[in-house]
Image (cartoon, grey):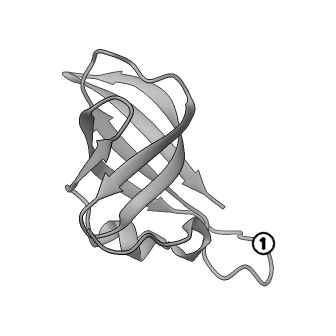
């Protein structure tokens, strides 16, 4: 696993590079798969990055309530992300994290 990076240093490109990859949820002992990365226009003037969101897919049960979770990825290291459940889609629960 690589060294941990500050969340404010991560960009959509960092996540696009690992789309499809697995992120281990330390507290729940299961993996989430990164399925989508979306960039948004209209960031804060002078902000070092464009706002973006990432969407993960995980098991239907147990459902993680919205909270901050420690996710571990072999390439990005350990990330403490605030994720929100978006609801089920077919055979998986979807979760989103937003970066301003």
Foreground of the two, 5 or 84: 5
Compared to 24, does 74 lie above or below? Answer: below
Q: Which x, y percent locates residue 54?
A: 43, 52
Left or right of 3 in this view: 17 = left
- Residue at the image position 20 percent from the left and 55 percent from the top: 20
Q: Quadrant of residue 47?
A: bottom right
The percent position of residue 64, horizontal first and vertical second, equals 43, 24
Mark 1 Cα-neighbour bin, 10 Å: few <14, some 14–19, many ≥20: few
Q: Residue furthest toward the right?
A: 45
Residue in the image at 27% along x and 32% along y: 29
Q: Is residue 73 above or below residue 27?
A: below
* Point 35% across, 39% down: residue: 26
Q: Residue at x 78, y 84 (%)?
A: 46
Residue corresponding to mark 1: 44
- Quarter of the image for the N terminus: give it: bottom left
Count the marks: 1
- Where does the image place residue 48, in percent across and percent down from the top left? 66, 82
Q: Of helix, strand and loop, which one carries label 1? A: loop
Name the foreground residue: 78 vs 35.
Answer: 78
The residue lying furthest to the top in this view is: 61
Is 32 above or below relative to 38?
above
Image side of residue 51 versus residue 86, left or right? right
- Quadrant of the rendering where the C terminus is positioned: bottom right
**Quarter occupied by residue 24:** top left
Q: Position of residue 30 (x, y in %)?
A: 24, 33
Quadrant of residue 56 within the rendered picture: top left
């Amino acid at each position: 696993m690589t060294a941990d990076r500050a969340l404010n240093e991560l960009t959509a490109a960092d996540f696009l590079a690992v789309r499809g990859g697995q992120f281990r949820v330390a507290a729940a002992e299961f993996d989430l798969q990164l399925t989508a990365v979306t960039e948004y226009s209209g960031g804060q003037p002078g902000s070092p990055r464009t706002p973006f969101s990432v969407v993960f897919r995980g098991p239907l049960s147990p459902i993680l309530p919205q909270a901050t979770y420690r996710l571990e990825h072999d390439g990005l290291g350990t990330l403490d992300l605030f994720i929100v459940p978006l609801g089920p889609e077919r055979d998986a629960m979807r979760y989103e994290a937003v970066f301003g």
